[in-house]
């Protein structure tokens, strides 16, 4: 199962910091929890305060449980060290399953 995640941050600067400092660490730590990072983007134009990621979960897993396990882990805490979590004002998670190509 793939998931599109849209992280809305308080401003462009917070998004850039989250994108450049946290996501490279996430790309190393997430696979340890069964989450593969397909792509990560920073929004453009009016969406410059957003970070967009596409991730893949193992088939038939409980996505919420996998996310909870990761977010409670030392790895997640280390990934987010130095970043103000309150700068993330919203996270949209959209499950996607099919593609035409």
Image (tube, rainbow, N blue to C red):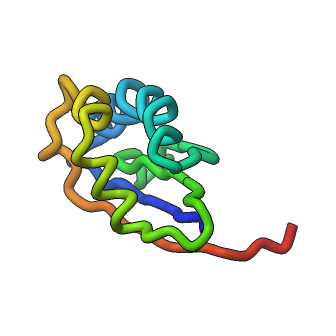
Q: Nearer the viewer, residue 35 or 95?
A: 35
Which residue: 40% across, 45% down?
48
Which residue: 22% across, 49% down?
88
Which residue: 73% across, 76% down?
98
Q: Is residue 54 above or below residue 79?
A: below
Which residue: 39% across, 50% down?
50
Q: Nearer the viewer, residue 33 or 21?
A: 33
Q: Nearer the viewer, residue 89 or 61?
A: 61
Q: Is residue 62 above or below residue 51?
A: below
Q: How many marks?
A: 0
Q: Quadrant of residue 75?
A: top left
Q: Residue furthest right?
A: 101
| Coordinates of residue 82 in the picture (x, y in percent) | 18, 23
Residue 95 lies left or right of residue 14; in this view the side is right
Q: Is residue 35 above or below residue 96?
A: above
| Coordinates of residue 29 in the picture (x, y in percent) | 44, 33
| Coordinates of residue 21 in the picture (x, y in percent) | 37, 25
Q: Is residue 96 above or below residue 3?
A: below
Q: Nearer the viewer, residue 32 or 25?
A: 32
* Location of the N terminus (image quadrant): bottom right
* Location of the C terminus (image quadrant): bottom right
């Amino acid at each position: 199962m793939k998931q599109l995640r849209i992280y809305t941050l308080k401003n462009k600067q917070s998004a850039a910091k989250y994108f450049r400092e946290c996501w490279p660490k996430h790309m190393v730590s997430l696979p340890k929890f069964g989450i593969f990072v397909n792509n990560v983007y920073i929004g453009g134009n009016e969406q410059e305060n957003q970070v967009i990621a596409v991730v893949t979960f193992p088939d038939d897993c409980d996505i919420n449980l996998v996310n909870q396990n990761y977010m409670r882990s030392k790895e997640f805490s280390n990934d987010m060290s130095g970043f103000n979590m309150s700068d993330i004002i919203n996270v949209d998670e959209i499950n996607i399953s099919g593609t035409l190509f």
